[in-house]
Image (cartoon, rainbow, N blue to C red):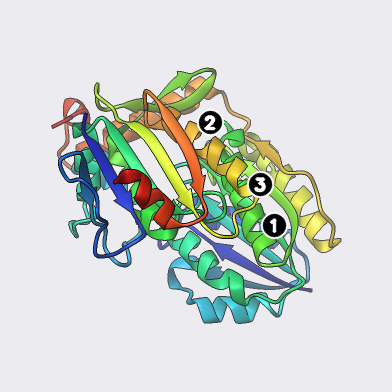
Amino acid sequence: MKILILNGSPKPSGSASEKLAEGLAQRLGNAEITMFNAMKTGKDEFVAQVNAIDALVVVFPLYVDGLPSHLLRLLDEAKGEIKSSARVYSIANNGFYEGQQNHLALEMMRHFSASSGMEWGQGLGVGAGGMVGVAPFGSGPMKNIGKALDKMAQNILNKQNGDDFYIQPNFPKFLYKMAAHRSWYSQAKGNGISRKGILRGD
Amino acid sequence: MKTLIIQDIDQNGIDVDLSKYTLFQMSERVKPCVGCFGCWIKTPGKCVIKDGDNVFLELMPKVDKVMVISKLTFGGFSPDIKGVFDRSIGFILPFFETVSGEMHHKQRYEKRPSLQYMFYGDNMTEAEKATAQKLVKANAVNLGAPDCSASFYATPDEILEGLK
């Protein structure tokens, strides 16, 4: 079984999308997996690979309720040239706590899938993406996410579809919010920006 | 009433009454957001990529309405317009607040434009249009827009006629 995992994060490394992609890949047993980064993949290379696989998995961060523009461009340019019987699966992650807020981006992935003549397999929306990687998938705050990756991996390997589903870490919302705010203050301080400076509106 | 137009119909601009509208001209191939969060923690409210496409964000707080004219792409914006929006999240703050039970970002500005999205395309499906209707509402919550709407046209000319 051949699988292409397309990482749609623009970050060169260490992104939540990359960690989710790796976590999923580890659950795909002996399948032959290729990993592409959408920032470094041309349309022709992408189309050739999609036309030779059984499953495409697109993993990406939510940007303004949709797909990051570089990923959108790649999929838009490729859609007319894809001739593939692969199923499409997708994992979207967002900075907000609720995984449900990825639902429009997953709808957009469904429209990509339909307009390229591929079958939609399943979508997963992961909330509190900033926490991905704080523990191994399947344990502690990453327990739910590990289970969700297990479920999607099984569907991919069994060549079956599943309902879209949404999850967030096993971690309270108010603590996630506090941790996020502390992180913003600390990162801004590192750039010489004060707490008040972050709020500037000129 | 100031209306800012961003459009993907013509790279050379469109013919509208410039006393009524401000035209924003994006690049031919808008550079993507690189996820650096510089617009929140390095140069708050400004995109760190200074190539002209960063200016849209700086115009947003100064207008009453943002009008987006875009080819409908998977139920949302075309890639260049999406690139400009991705690079405009400095319009809001990194901090979170709860809006109707959901987590969203706090607003940076008191005055925020309403959103009017006008989509065109010759093969728009009902499902894609339904996604776009939900998109404008979701964007309005995230960008704190006082009002929003989405409408659909078979050709760009229909939109341009309406603006004359």
Identified at 54% across, 37% down, the residue is B133
Badge 1: chain ID: A
Which element is circle 1 on?
A: strand
- A53 with respect to B134 (left or right): right
Identified at 42% across, 41% down, the residue is B117
Disc 2 and disc 1 in contact, CB within 8 angstroms: no
Residue A137, horizontal then vertical, whole percent: 65, 46
Mark 2 and mark 1: span between their CA atoms?
A: 22 Å
Given this view, does label 1 or label 3 mark the residue nearer the observer?
3
Quick one: A17 or A186, which is closer to the camera?
A: A17
Residue A185, horizontal then vertical, whole percent: 28, 31
Residue on which disc 1 sits: A89
Residue on which disc 2 sits: A97
Residue A69, horizontal then vertical, whole percent: 43, 57
Q: Is residue B91 above or below residue B77?
A: above
Q: Residues within 10 Å of mark 2 (few under 14, many from 20)?
A: many
Residue on which disc 3 sits: B127
Q: Is residue B57 visible?
A: yes
Disc 2 residue type (three-letter): Tyr
Disc 3 residue type (three-letter): Ala
Quarter of the picture containing the N terminus of chain B is top left
Disc 1 residue type (three-letter): Tyr
